[in-house]
């Protein structure tokens, strides 16, 4: 019969300590506190400098290397992309930090930290797109270099001199 006792507990035929008993609650609470003390605290916001540097590297890559953004709006030379990426990240970080400060001194929970991090991510994306669009529009609006416009004018004059006369020119000659 002594041999059957361990099997009886495993099979559930012997009564087990109830989960609601005080004896069962104390070890569970002590275990939870011990686990909290051993685990490092999880802080979502603000991101570490290493994370911010990784964001800047990714922005440079997006602006300078072939990407959907650079294909649509044009690639940015790497030195200019580096300066722009640092500025975009810093402005987005400042904006997200300002919104986090308005909510509380420091996000009290992981959920609040995630919300601020999402705002930071959206701000980085928005500012990056604005930069690409502005740069593309400025490049399109910029006048052609003086040499290029002189050459274009010369080629236009040469083509008009060799082109057959139009009806209007024929009427004027008569």
Image (cartoon, rainbow, N blue to C red):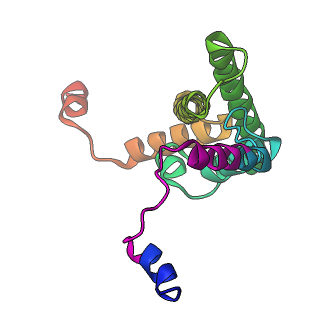
Query: Dividing the picture into quarters, in which one does residue 11 lie?
Result: bottom left
Question: Where's residue 34, x and y in %?
Answer: 75, 48
**Left/right of residue 41 with respect to residue 153 in the rendered view:** right
Where does the image place residue 122, in percent across and percent down from the top left?
Answer: 53, 32
Residue visible at 76% across and 36% down in the picture: 86
Residue that protrudes farthest toward the right in the picture: 49
Q: Nearer the viewer, residue 131 or 18?
A: 18
Give the residue displayed 62% in from the left and 29% down from the top.
109
Q: Residue drawn 65% across and 24% down? A: 108
Q: In which quarter of the image is residue 10?
A: bottom left
Q: Position of residue 157 (x, y in %)?
A: 47, 39
Q: Nearer the viewer, residue 113 or 99?
A: 113
Q: Seen in the image, is 124 located left or right of residue 21?
A: right
Q: Is residue 19 one of those drawn in magenta?
A: yes
For the C terminus, give its image quadrant.
Answer: top left
Segment tinted magenta in the rendering: 11-33
In front: 168, or 37?
A: 37
Residue closest to the eye, 21 or 66: 21
Residue 63 visible = yes
Is-magenta flag for residue 22? yes
Note whether residue 77 is visible: no
Residue 72 position, x and y percent, is 46, 46
């Amino acid at each position: 019969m002594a041999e059957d006792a361990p099997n009886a507990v495993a099979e559930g035929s012997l009564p087990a300590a109830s989960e609601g008993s005080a004896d069962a609650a104390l070890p569970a609470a002590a275990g939870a506190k011990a686990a909290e003390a051993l685990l490092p605290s999880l802080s979502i916001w603000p991101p570490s400098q290493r994370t911010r540097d990784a964001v800047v590297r990714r922005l440079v890559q997006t602006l300078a290397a072939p990407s959907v953004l650079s294909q649509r709006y044009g690639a940015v030379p790497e030195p200019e992309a580096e300066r722009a990426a640092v500025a975009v990240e810093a402005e987005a970080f400042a904006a997200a930090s300002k919104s986090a400060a308005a909510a509380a001194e420091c996000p009290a929970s992981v959920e609040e930290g995630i919300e601020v991090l999402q705002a930071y991510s959206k701000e980085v994306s928005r500012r990056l797109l604005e930069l690409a669009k502005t740069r593309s529009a400025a490049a399109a609006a910029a006048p052609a270099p003086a040499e290029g416009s002189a050459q274009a004018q010369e080629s236009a004059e040469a083509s008009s001199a060799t082109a057959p006369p139009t009806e209007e020119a024929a009427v004027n000659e008569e």
